[in-house]
Amino acid sequence: MNALIRPGFARILAAAAFTLSAPGAHAFCGFYVGKADANLFNDASQVVMVRDGDRTTITMRNQYEGDLKEFAMVVPVPEVLAEESIKVVDDVLFQRIDAYSAPRLAEYYDANPCHALRERKSMLGRLPQSLAMDAAQLKVEEDRGVTVEATYTIGEYDVVILSAKESSGLEIWLRENGYRIPEGAAQALAPYIRQDLKFFVAKVNLAEQAKTGSTYLRPMQFSFHTEKFMLPIRLGMLNARGPQDLVLWVLTRTGRVEATNYRTIRLPANMDIPTYVKGDFRTFYKALFDTQAKREDYRVLFTEYVWNMSWCDPCAANPLTPAELRGLGVDWVTAGGRRAARAQPVMLTRLHVRYTAETFPEDLVFQETKDRANYQARYVLRHPAKVKPDACPAAGPYLDGVAARQEREAKVLATLTNWDVDEIRDRMGITQRQRPWWEEWWVGMAP
Amino acid sequence: MGRDGAVMSGRHDMLSKGRSLAARLPRDARMVQILFLGVLLGAGALVRDFTLRPEQMALTFAAGLATQLACVRALGLQRVGVLSALITCLGLSILLRADSLWVHPLAAALAIASKFSIRAGGKHLFNPGNLGVIAGVALIPGAWISPGQWGSDVAYAAWFLALGAVVSSRAQRLDTSWAFLACYLGLVAARVAWLGYEWAVFVHQLESGALLLFAFFMISDPMTTPNHRGARVAHAAVVAAGAFAWQFLLFLPNGLVWALFIATPLVPLLDRVFRAERFNWRDNRALPTPGSPAPRTTTTLG
C-alpha cells in the first residue's frame, strides 16, 4: 500500500515491539488459548479500510523502527484531501481489531468414556481466564508540472497533497524536496497520474513527534469519496525484496468483501491438529501460512475472518465498541453501547495476502458480496481422556479411536505446514502401527 | 512419390483422422457443452474450492429440470428435451454463489421459465444462464457472483480456450466468441497503453478465467445471439464495449454479465434488420428454410 520513498533503508512496517496477551475468552464449549496476530508477520502492512457507498476511510499502521527523519510514505488518493479528513488515531484500534479477528486455537477435552456424562466445565475452569484488552497553502511549480495542492501538519506528520501532470516531473520534484525515491518510480507513478489521482505524501515532523513523548508513530487515517473500491499496492512493490504481506481489515454494511481481479479463498481451517501445537501456535500458523501461500504461488488473497461485528459467539476478544468502530471510520454506527451496534450491522472481512511484483501486476479491486456467512481461521485441539484400556468395556474402543484420530491429526498438520510427518509423530509421542492398506485408506478418508 | 508427397499424405491422414474423430462427437453440440461444463464444475468444486454446497447444486438441477418439464407439458410442446436446461443449471452452478439454499433453485426456475415466456422472433429473448445470474445479483438477497474465483493461471486460460473453441465450433458460433474477445481485449490493451501500465496488466486480464468462460460458454449461445453473422459480430462488439465501460469507466463489478443482459433487446432488432436462418441445435446448423414460419414443434426451445 504505502511506498517508501527512500530505497534500502529500514522497512516501513517492521516488527512490532508489543505482543498481545493470549486471551482465554469463554467459547461455546471450547476455549481459545492461542492466537496468531498480524505482528507475527514482521513485514506485514496493516490497513483498515471502511467502505460505505462511495465513501472510503483508510487507516494505515506504521510500524516503523528506523530513523524517524527518514520515514516517508506516498499513497495515491482520488481527491485533494481536506485537513479534517486526515487524522492520526490510537494504535489501540489496530490492536483491538487484530485481537478480535486473529486466527485462533480452540481447545476441547474428551469426556471420559467410562463417565460419558461427566461435566466438562470442571476441566475448562482450569484454563487461564480472559485478559480483556479492552488550510492549505497552494503552491504551483509550473516547471515540473507538480502542484502542491495542500500542506498540513497532522499530529506528528507533515502531509503534502500533490497533483502532477508528468510522472518524471513528480519524480524530480520528490528528489529535489529531499525524498530519495527508488528507481522505476516514475513508471509506477504514471498510471495514477493518467487517472488524475493525487498523491498523499507524509513524513515525520520531529518537533511534533517529540511532543507526543512516544517512540512509535501513530496510525494515520484519511477519508475520501470515490466509486473505485480498490487499494493501491503497486507503489509499495518498488523497493520490495521478495514477497510482501498485507493484512487488510475491511468494514462494510452488507457482506463479505473479496477481490474481483484476483482469487480470494479461505485458508484451510477448522480441522483437528495435535495438542502439542498449543505451546507454539505462532510457529504453527506462520508455517501454515507460508506453506499455503507458496502452494498458491503467491497469487491469491486468503480470507482469515468474516464476522458480523455486532455480535460474536465465540469471541477471541471482545468485539469493538461503537466508539472504536467510529474511530476507524464506521460512521453508520452511532454511539449507544453494544445494543445499538447490534441493530447496525458491521461486517468485518480480514484478508491476508502475500504477493510479489510478478504475481500481483494490478492494484487490488474489491467488491462487497451479499455473503453474510461467518468464517474464522480456527484450529482445534482435542485432548484425549486419561483412561486405562481395561478401565471399562468402552475404554478399549475409545483408545483405538483416539489412536486413529491422532494419526489423522499428524497427517493434517504435515499437509498444512509441510513439516515432516515422522517428526510430528515423535513430538506427539505416537508411533505408526502397520495397518492393512484398506485401514490406511479409511483413516485417510475419514473427515 | 517424393518426400513432399509423403509429408502431404501424412498430413492428409491426420486431417482425415481428425475429421473422423470430430464425426464421432455427438451431432448436438450441447452434449459436448454439457460434458465440458461438467468438467469445469467438477474441477472448480474440487480443485478451486468453490464455495458451492452439493445441496445447492442438487436443488439447482431439480428446480431447473422440473420447470423445463412443467413448461413443456403445459405448452404441449414435442421434441423438446432437457439438454439446454442442463446447460443452464450447470452454468448457474458454476457462476452463482449464495449463503442459503433457496437462491439457486429460484434462479434456475426463473431462468428456464423465461425461455418459454419471454420470446421474440420465434426464439427466447434472454440467455437463460445470464438471466439467472442477473436475477441472483440484482433481485435475490444473499446471492452474488465471484468473478475472481478462477484466478488467472495460464494453464486454466489455455484449458478454457481449448475446451471453449471446440464447443463453439460445434455450435458454429466461434465468430461470436472471437469477435467479443477481440473487441474487449482491444479496449483493455488500449487502456493499458494509455495509462502507461506494464503489459503484465494486459496479460493478467487476458488470463482471466471468468472472461474466457463468458466468451466461450455464455455469449456464444446460438439461440440468444443474432442469426446473421455480421449482426452477431456487431452484437458481440456492443457487449464488449458495454462490459469495458461498466468495469473501467463506472468501476462496477460483473461488467460481462451486465453488458450481455442490457444488450439483450438488441438481438430481436438485429434479427429484424438482418434476415438470416435460425439455428437448429439437433442438426447443429441453421434451419434450411429462411423466412419460413417455425413449426409448432419447434426445436429451438429445448
Image: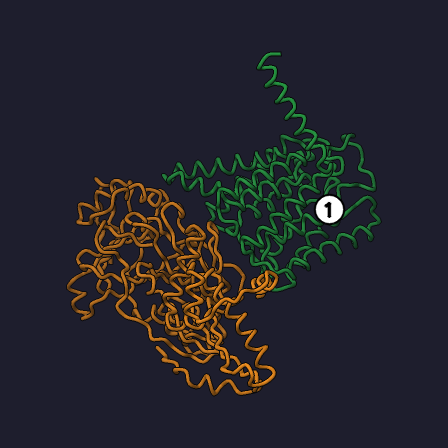
Q: Is residue A445 left or right of residue A208?
A: right
SS of the residue under disc 1: helix
Image vertical order of residue A400 relative to residue B94, above or below: below
Q: Could you say which is closer to the camera, residue A202 or residue A108?
A: A108
Q: What residue lies at 53% left-to-right and 72% top-to-bottom? A: A403
Tell me where residue A411 appears, x and y as whole percent.
49, 63
Q: Quadrant of residue A445?
A: bottom right
Indicate the quadrant containing the C terminus of chain A: top left, top right, bottom left or bottom right: bottom right
Tell me where residue A272 appears, x and y as whole percent.
50, 69
Chain identifier matching the orange colour in the rendered picture: A
Image vertical order of residue A302 relative to residue A182, above or below: below
The number of numbered badges drawn on the structure is: 1
Q: What residue lies at 16% left-to-right and 67% top-to-bottom? A: A210
Tell me where residue B198 appears, x and y as whole percent.
37, 39
Indicate the quadrant containing the N terminus of chain A: top left, top right, bottom left or bottom right: bottom left
Residue at far front of view: A434
Q: What residue lies at 73% left-to-right and 32% top-to-bottom? A: B277
Q: Amino acid at mark 1?
A: Leu
Tell me where residue A74 appears, x and y as whole percent.
28, 52
Q: Quadrant of residue A193?
A: top left
Quickly name the residue at label 1: B83
Q: Is residue A22 visible?
A: yes
Q: Is residue A145 left or right of residue B144?
A: left
Q: Is residue B203 left or right of residue A13?
A: right
Chain identifier matching the green colour in the rendered picture: B
